[in-house]
Image: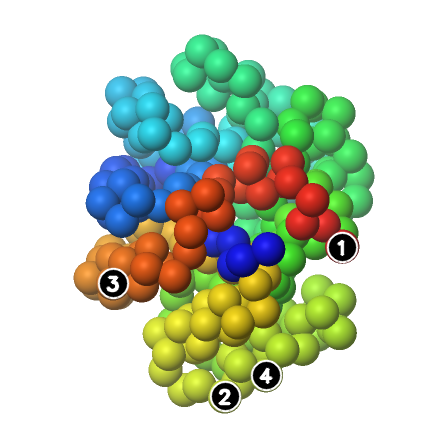
Amino acid sequence: MSAVFTFSTDDGHPSDMKMAELLGKNGLNGTFYIPITNREGLPVMCQSQILDVGRQFEIGSHTYDHCYLKNVGLVEANRQITEGKKRLEDLLGKPVAGFSYPGGKYREAHAAMVQSAGFEYARSSMNLCFDAGLSRFEIPTTIQFYPHTKAVYFRNFLKAGRWNKRADGLRLALQHNSWLERMYALFDHSCEQESVFHLWAHSVDINRINAWNDIDRFFGYVAKKVAVQNRLTNQQLASREYFI
C-alpha cells in the first residue's frame, strides 16, 4: 500500500469550524470527537455548527462532558460513554461509530464499555505509531500538532509500550529540536515506509499558539504526497486491515 493519512481533533471547540475549513480546502478527510458539554468550562460547538461539520466529516463521541474516565466510578464512566453517544446520534440523526478517550485516560474496563455501547472503534492518545495498533478500541496516533518537548515523547514512549513498533518514531522525534520539523520528519518517514500517519490536535491549542498557517501548510504538503483514496477518516482506518 502507499502512505495513509488520517486526522482527528478533540473537544468540539468552536475553532473546529476553522479546522474543517482548512481540511476541506486541502481535500483531506478528518474526524471530530465532540462532547456534548465540557466540564472544564471550554465552549463546545452549537448544534448547527456540529451539523455543518458533520455534513463533510466524521463526527465521533468524546464522552458526555469531556470526562476523564479513570477519575470516575464505573457506573458514571458507562453513563458518560452511552449518554454522549446517544445525544450526538439524536443531534445528527445517524449512528456515531467512533469514540476518543478524553485525555487518553482509560482502563481495559472502559474499552469494553465503549465496545458494549455499540461503537465500532475508539482512538487513544498513544503516539509515535505508524499503524492502526492492536485493537480497534485502542487505535494509536503518530503525533499531536503541538509544540511538545522531547521529554513528553520520551515519557509517552516508556509508559505506553509497543516499544519495537514505536522506536523509529521516538528516534525521529528526538532528532529534531523544532516541533514542526519533527512532524514533517515523521510524516516523510511514513511516506517512505508506506505506512499510516495519524495526526491529531486540539483546535483551541492552535488558537493559543497562533499556528493556523502552520497546519494549513502541513495539510497542503500532505495533499501533495498522499493519494486521494488514502486520505481517511478514523472510521475508514478502523474498517480496513491496517491492524498488526
Foreground mark, 1 or 4, reads: 1
What's the CA distance linking mark 1 and mark 3?
Answer: 31 Å
Report the front residue among 80 and 171. Answer: 171
In the rendered structure, which amino acid carries the disc numbered 3?
Arg
Res 187 label: none
Q: Residue at x 67, y 71 (%)?
A: 166
Residue underneath mark 1: 244
What's the CA distance linking mark 4 and mark 2?
Answer: 6 Å
Label 4 close to label 2 by CB (< 8 Å): yes
In the rendered structure, which amino acid carries the disc numbered 4?
Arg
What's the CA distance linking mark 2 and mark 3?
Answer: 22 Å
Q: Secondary structure at mark 3?
A: helix
Q: From the top left corner, tell me how far across and down residue 78 is, in percent.
A: 69, 28
Residue underneath mark 3: 217
Mark nearer the N terminus (3 vs 4): 4
Q: From the top left corner, tell me how far across and down residue 96 is, in percent.
A: 54, 24
* Left or right: 163 as drawn, with respect to 190: right
Residue underneath mark 2: 175
What's the CA distance linking mark 1 and mark 2?
Answer: 26 Å
Mark nearer the N terminus (2 vs 3): 2
In the rendered structure, which amino acid carries the disc numbered 1?
Ile
Mark nearer the N terminus (1 vs 2): 2
Can you say which quadrant of the picture contains the N terminus? bottom right
What's the CA distance linking mark 1 and mark 4?
Answer: 21 Å
Q: Residue at x 37, y 79 (%)?
A: 181
Residue underneath mark 4: 171
Foreground mark, 1 or 2, reads: 1
Q: Residue at x 62, y 64 (%)?
A: 129
